[in-house]
Amino acid sequence: MRPLLIVMSAPSGAGKSTLCDLLLQEFPEITYSVSCTTRAPRGEEEDGVDYYFLSQEAFEQHVREGLLLEHAEVHGNRYGTPAEPVREAFAEGQSVLMDIDVVGAASVRRYVAGLPAGDPLREGFVDVFVEPPSLEELRRRLVGRGEDSPESIEVRLRNAEGEMARAHEFAYRVVNDDLRQAYLRLRDIVLLKGGAL
């Protein structure tokens, strides 16, 4: 399979993380992109594994030096994707999976579109939007997780509406109404774009 830059976005609760995990389990040639952030580590998070934890100053320097594929501010913290590990993975024949929001995906899309024809990142770019079957089902899933307050769920649902309104920006859309079927669709997209189908 030729190296791919796989960008996945979805509303919170749509099942994107589960689909990403399944993809990583099946395809050892796909590596997960570790983002950098200015927020403090949570719980057992490790620097370089979960995120690269940077100071505001270091993050700004990364932006100034053009070291990030994309970057954005979310809930008062900065997040970004370092370009060098992505390029290194491609040089080793590895694909890279990015799990980012729709704003970050749009930034990566712009970055890739600005690369010269024939650039491996441009040639291997594929973006997928994972969507729930409906907002009602998304609400049911968020409530069922038992992780969020009712207020937080309402914020996530409002955000989901805005994110779903941008689903048309993605080359591929996968409706996660049945996990197995959604994964098979995602798998087919990856195999097709990777030249393995």
Image: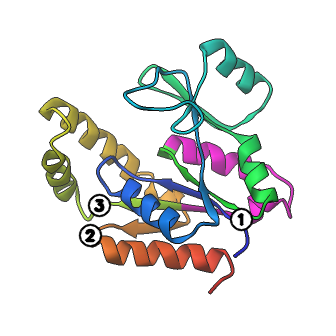
Q: Which secondary structure lies at badge 2?
A: loop
Name the N-terminal-most of marks 1 and 2: 1
Task: Magenta stretch: give its range.
Answer: 103-127
Mark 3 in CB contact with mark 2 (< 8 angstroms): yes
Q: Amino acid at mark 3?
A: Pro
Considering the whole magenta stretch, tell me its main secondary structure: helix
- Residue in the image at 35% along x and 68% along y: 175
Q: Amino acid at mark 1?
A: Gly
Q: CA distance from mark 3 to mark 2?
A: 6 Å
- Residue in the image at 14% along x and 46% along y: 143
Q: CA distance from mark 1 to mark 3?
A: 26 Å
Splitting the image into 4 quarters, where does residue 44 fall?
A: top left
Q: Which mark is residue 132?
A: 3
Crowd class of label 3 (few under 14; some 14 to 19; many from 20; radius 10 Å) = many
Label 1 sits on residue: 124
Residue 116 appears left or right of 149: right
Residue 16 percent across, percent down from the top left: 39, 56
Mark 1 in CB contact with mark 2 (< 8 angstroms): no
Residue 119 appears left or right of 184: right
- Residue in the image at 44% along x and 57% along y: 167
Crowd class of label 1 (few under 14; some 14 to 19; many from 20; radius 10 Å) = some
Name the N-terminal-most of marks 1 and 3: 1
Residue 54 percent across, percent down from the top left: 61, 21
Judge by depth and name the residue closer to the eye, 114 or 92: 92
Q: Quadrant of the C terminus?
A: bottom right
Image height of 99 relative to 149, above or below: below
Label 2 sits on residue: 177
Quick check: is 119 in the magenta stretch?
A: yes
Q: CA distance from mark 1 to mark 2?
A: 28 Å
Q: Amino acid at mark 2?
A: Asp
Residue 97 percent across, percent down from the top left: 58, 56
